[in-house]
Amino acid sequence: MKRMDRRTVFCVVLAAMLFCAGGAGAQTGNGPVPERPKVLYAAGWEDNSGGYDIATVWKIDGSTVTPVALTDGTRDAGVYALAVSGGSLYAAGYERDSYDERVAMVWRIDGSRVTPVALTNGTRDAAVFGIVKSGGSLYAAGWDAKGFPTVWKIDGSRVTSIVLTGGSHLYAVIGILRHSNHER
């Protein structure tokens, strides 16, 4: 295991993943006290000996820190955002292609299995800065290969994009839960 320090991680994003075996935690006069997260994740990139940045997620379980490399270290890559849904962790950022262009990327992490999904084709620089899982779909926010703010909808291997032409930067996306019994 490598030690994580501030020089190694440019952008640290924490996501809490709760593994509760039932029960809502201790009770107080104001209601249940939320349980503390048992596992935290930090994300960013780590330099390798070849001088490339490896997109990395660190699993923090108490005092144990375990790095999970998302890329092979043959090209620069980095993670800017994390989301947790069910038993899966999602990381979002970029990976440089063979032409040194940034490809907008999302990685799904299930234990030790990492599944990458490219959101752009690498014709020009692109990256993802925010991610959320909502209503069975994954949504990513960033900028596309033309430099436009974009939201991508990811359903398995199917990716669709919505280009927002009114702005110049997009760094966050949030999911809103709808309750059908309250809608008209």
Image: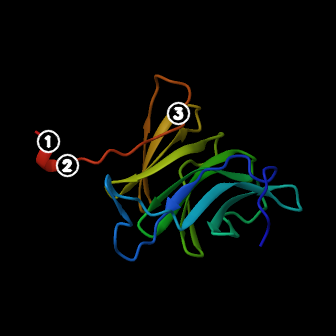
Q: What label does residue 74 carry, if any?
A: none
Q: For label 2, count other residues whose C-alpha is less than 10 Å away and answer few (under 14), some (14-19) or many (20+).
A: few
> Which amino acid lies under the numbered mark 2 shown in the image of this protein?
His
Instruction: Say if residue 62 shows up in the picture.
Output: yes
On the picture, is 156 further left or further right than 167?
Answer: left
At a point 82% along the width and 50% down the height, the residue shown is 7
Q: Eyeballing the image, is 73 above or below 145? A: below
When asked about the image quadrant of residue 142, the answer is top right
> What residue is shown with label 3?
170
Q: Nearer the viewer, residue 31 or 129?
A: 31
Discs 2, 1 touching: Cβ within 8 Å: yes
Q: Which amino acid does the dot numbered 1 rest on?
A: Glu
The residue labelled by disc 2 is: 179
Q: Secondary structure at mark 3?
A: loop
Query: Hey, what amino acid is under mark 3?
Result: Leu
Q: Is residue 97 visible?
A: no
Residue receiving disc 1: 183
